[in-house]
Image (cartoon, rainbow, N blue to C red):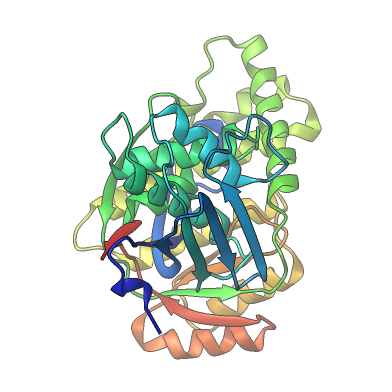
Amino acid sequence: MILISDLKNSINIVTPGRVCLFGDHQDYLGLPIIAAAINRFIYFSSEENTDGYFHIRMPDIGEERMIAISESFDSLLKNDHLGSVLRVVRRYGCIPKNGYDIEIKSTIPINAGVSSSSAVVVSWTHFLLETFGSDQKITPQFVAQLAYEAEVLEHQSPGGKMDQYTIALGNIIYLETGAALSFRAIGKQLYGLVLGVSGIPKQTLGVLGNLREKAQEAISEVKRKEPQFDLKKTRPQETKRFLPLITTSLRPYFLAAIENHDITLRALKAFETQPLDTKIIGQLMTEHHGVLKDRLHITVPLIDSMIDAALGAGAYGAKIVGSGGGGSIIALVPKKQIVAVIKAIKDSGATNAFEVEVVGGSRVIRS
């Protein structure tokens, strides 16, 4: 048997999943997030062929696809991210010139809030740029931006930039997601992270679209009456004066935006303080989860039980991961309690729980 790694014209991409530590439902408002790439991966392997097609096999989900390298995707089917990536990269001078046999495998839990879909998009984008070049310098930020354009802008999806940038850049990042995008690494490790998978599929687009619309509507109501209002500069203690300006049903979404922003800024200070106090970071994670649960109502009973179980078994803190309505939780746990917390999460009804580590971003393995 010939292994892909033995062939001259092959390129492999290893791309991580991600967990959001702080800033859920913030990036689509232009507010900052703190997220980490984790050691669950998309393994993208390829071998050059001569028939002018991308033969793409995805055995984990039992799908195969053939795409002609000449296909421009002038029109897109809903959620066709492979097609939208090809459409986007062409704008940047990345023109496929030959076909490849491709296999995409994953150890990232699917539909669990840890960005398995975005990892595929980043991996596919990374492959095309590295294989066929571009009229711009290929950097992790460039890969992230094109993946974002393909996954979010091309499909007019309600998501933000967190997933693509965290996955492409790697490690723990603080990302300012607004028009003046900026990012910086704030850590390469956070020991004691435990991921608990509920087994309940998250409801990304529906939840994101609904919450984004309501948060933006609440903010617009304030700005119509207070044109100088600045979401980024408003602290929780100032919210009382704005609430009378907002429709009652929209007030929780306004409060959640400001409270979660404040928590993220406090978490940033904690990450920048050495030595790292993981207990404080854990407590802030739990505080953040409380806003997601009580203001935005994105949890379900099993997620709540998993959080309670993790905290009861000694975790410093825990929160839901993903857009909500299912998905996973991430807990920050003292080393001596990791086994107990994993057991407690599983016993609460989770389909799985395991320790994860912070890793670097999407990388190329050439042969």
Left/right of residue 313 with respect to residue 186 in the rendered view = right
Residue at 60% over, 68% down: 328
Residue 210 on image: x %, y %: 75, 39
Query: Is residue 42 visible in the rendered structure shown here?
Result: yes
Q: Nearer the viewer, residue 33 or 17?
A: 17
Q: Is residue 345 above or below residue 320?
A: below
Query: Is residue 160 visible in the rendered structure shown here?
Result: no
Residue at 38% over, 42% down: 143
Left/right of residue 211 with respect to residue 331 in the rendered view = right
Residue 249 on image: x %, y %: 80, 34
Q: Is residue 305 above or below residue 263?
A: below
Q: Quadrant of residue 156?
A: top right
Q: Residue furthest front?
A: 50
Left/right of residue 294 with respect to residue 182 in the rendered view = right
Q: Is residue 321 above or below residue 224?
A: below
Q: Quadrant of residue 170?
A: bottom left
Q: Is residue 274 above or below residue 215?
A: below
Q: Quadrant of the N terminus?
A: bottom left
Residue at 64% over, 63% down: 64
Residue 173 on image: x %, y %: 34, 49
Residue 88 on image: x %, y %: 50, 33
Q: Nearer the viewer, residue 121 or 108?
A: 121
Q: Nearer the viewer, residue 308 or 298?
A: 298
Residue at 73% over, 33% down: 214
